[in-house]
Image: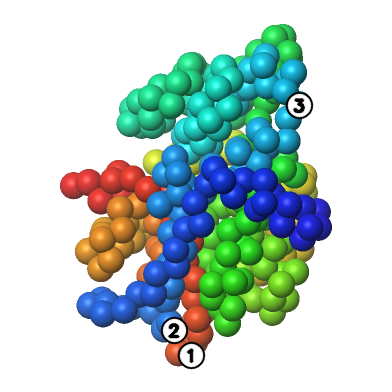
Amino acid sequence: MELAEIRAARERIRPYVRRTPILEAVAVKERPYEGQLFFKLEDLQVSGSFKARGAVNKLLSLPQAQLERGIITASGGNHGVAVAYAGWMARVPTQVYLPTTVPPIKIEKLRRWGASVVLEGDVFDDAQRLALQVAERDGLEYIHPFADPLVIAGQGTIGLEIAEDLPDVDTVVIAIGGGGLIAGISLALHHLKPDVRIIGVEPVGAPTLKESVEAGELVTLEAIHTRAGTLAPRRSAQINLDIISQHVDEIVLVSDEEMSFAAQWLWFETGIAAELSGAASMAALLQNKFKTQEDERICVLVCGAGADGIAP
């Protein structure tokens, strides 16, 4: 992929997504980290997460005849909501397949955007297997949550915004699910600022890309053990692994308890309501999973809104 594809994605999706702000963390009571901290607030994105960028970019690239037949996807939650939003925007039939573990609030959001919802299996991979079968049978366009160049380019528009709004950033910390988000952002940032450090964060119970990068090939996890369902595919894809292997400096792991603590920290210190996956990057910083310096400028991506991380 080239930077031009990400720039083209930005122009394509501009009328339909938000340019989210960067917030500096000032007047922080508990500061167990070094450096100057900034948040890229994709929890304020339309649909509640960054996923709208990739879903809209993919949808706007489809021919009208294909759109009229309808679109279909599988998701751990946030991508499904984004595709439902894109389908509502284009006024096309939308089907979303989810694992049974998805929180009811996400199912309700999907239905409010007009999507039909099917629950299948315990993890994303189960839902995707059935969705792909239906897509082939009915001739529907399957919008992949992470293994599609157009989706990756859409997510990469976040990297353009970070480079423009925080040009002297040193480190960017990004949660990893299937790898589309970190692939797009790291590709964009390294084209514009080659010396920026990219830290990826996965759950301890779903180290899909950490194990794949270390093995030098795609690894399929035997099981998933995390409540952060949007960060929990059993397997990524080659396009994501190739980009991440080249552009991501380090992948670290955080527990569900560490993500929950980070979500509570974000709520208390800044008023940011982040779901578990949305707080994963902050958890890595709070738990010193990677080294920081006193003069370092660190940008943490808050990738999804929600209250599951701060509920008692």
Against 169, residue 187 (above or below) is above
Q: Residues within 10 Å of mark 2 (few under 14, many from 20)?
A: some
Q: Amino acid at mark 2?
A: Gly
From the image, tell me which residue sits under label 2: 35
Residue 140 placement: quadrant: top right
Judged from the image, the secondary structure of the residue bearing numbered disc 3 is loop
Judged from the image, the secondary structure of the residue bearing numbered disc 2 is loop
Q: Residue furthest front?
A: 15
Judged from the image, the secondary structure of the residue bearing numbered disc 1 is loop
Q: Are marks 1 and 2 in contact (CB under 8 Å)?
A: yes
From the image, tell me which residue sits under label 1: 295
Q: Amino acid at mark 3?
A: Pro
Quick one: label 3 or label 2, which is nearer the N terminus? Answer: 2
Q: Nearer the viewer, mark 3 or mark 2?
A: 3
Residue 66: image location, x then y, percent: 73, 20
From the image, tell me which residue sits under label 3: 63
Against 177, residue 247 (above or below) is below
Q: Are marks 3 and 2 in contact (CB under 8 Å)?
A: no
Against 257, residue 293 (above or below) is below
Residue 34: image location, x then y, percent: 41, 83
Question: In this rendering, would 205 be left or right of 12?
Answer: left
Quick one: label 1 or label 2, which is nearer the N terminus? Answer: 2
Residue ID at (60%, 38%): 55
